[in-house]
């Protein structure tokens, strides 16, 4: 059986993700990252950094970003599990 805390976290993430844009325009996404204070807005790989920016913005109260670090391994996000 799945831990109830994990189920609750997944439900919160699903609800919060509904407010995330489904279609991304490169120029407006980069400008949004710049205005939002992201240090990665100049990166050529803007799509990955934009997704990370959206997660940090929309999931702020749900998961910890960045996640925990175990020795040399750092996870992008953490709540009950990485």
Image (cartoon, rainbow, N blue to C red):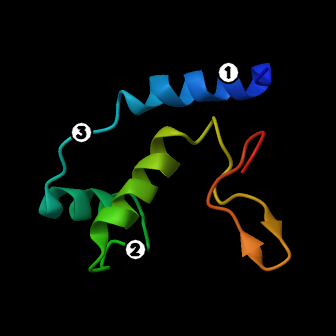
Closer to the eye: label 1 or 2? 1
Q: Which mark is residue 8?
A: 1
- What residue is rendered at 63% in x and 36% in y? 61
Give the number of marks: 3
* Horizontal side of residue 72 vs 31, given as left or right: right
Which one is nearer the viewer's eye here, 79 or 1? 1
Q: Earlier in the sequence, mark 3 or mark 1?
A: 1
Q: Earlier in the sequence, mark 1 or mark 2?
A: 1
Query: How far across and down, in percent of the image, does residue 47 sit?
Result: 29, 63
Q: Earlier in the sequence, mark 2 or mark 3?
A: 3
**In whole angstroms, how far apart are the C-alphas of marks 1 and 2?**
31 Å
Disc 1 crowd, CA 10 A, few/some/many (<14, 14-19, 20+): few
Q: Quadrant of residue 41?
A: bottom left
Q: Quadrant of residue 44?
A: bottom left
Asked if marks 3 and 1 touch (Cβ < 8 Å), the reply is no
Residue pointed to by mark 2: 40
Closer to the eye: label 2 or 3? 3
- Above or below 47: residue 57: above
Looking at the rendering, in which quadrant would you find the N terminus? Answer: top right
* Horizontal side of residue 54 vs 66, given as left or right: left
Q: Which mark is residue 22?
A: 3
Query: How far across and down, in percent of the image, does residue 78 sit?
Result: 71, 49
- What residue is rendered at 71% in x and 57% in y? 67
């Amino acid at each position: 059986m799945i831990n109830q805390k994990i189920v609750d976290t997944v439900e919160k993430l699903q609800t919060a993700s509904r407010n995330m844009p489904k279609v991304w325009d490169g120029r407006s996404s980069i400008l949004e990252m710049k205005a939002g204070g992201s240090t990665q807005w100049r990166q050529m790989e803007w799509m990955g950094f934009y997704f990370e920016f959206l997660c940090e913005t929309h999931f702020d109260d749900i998961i910890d970003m960045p996640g925990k670090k175990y020795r040399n391994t750092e996870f992008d996000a953490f709540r009950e599990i990485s």
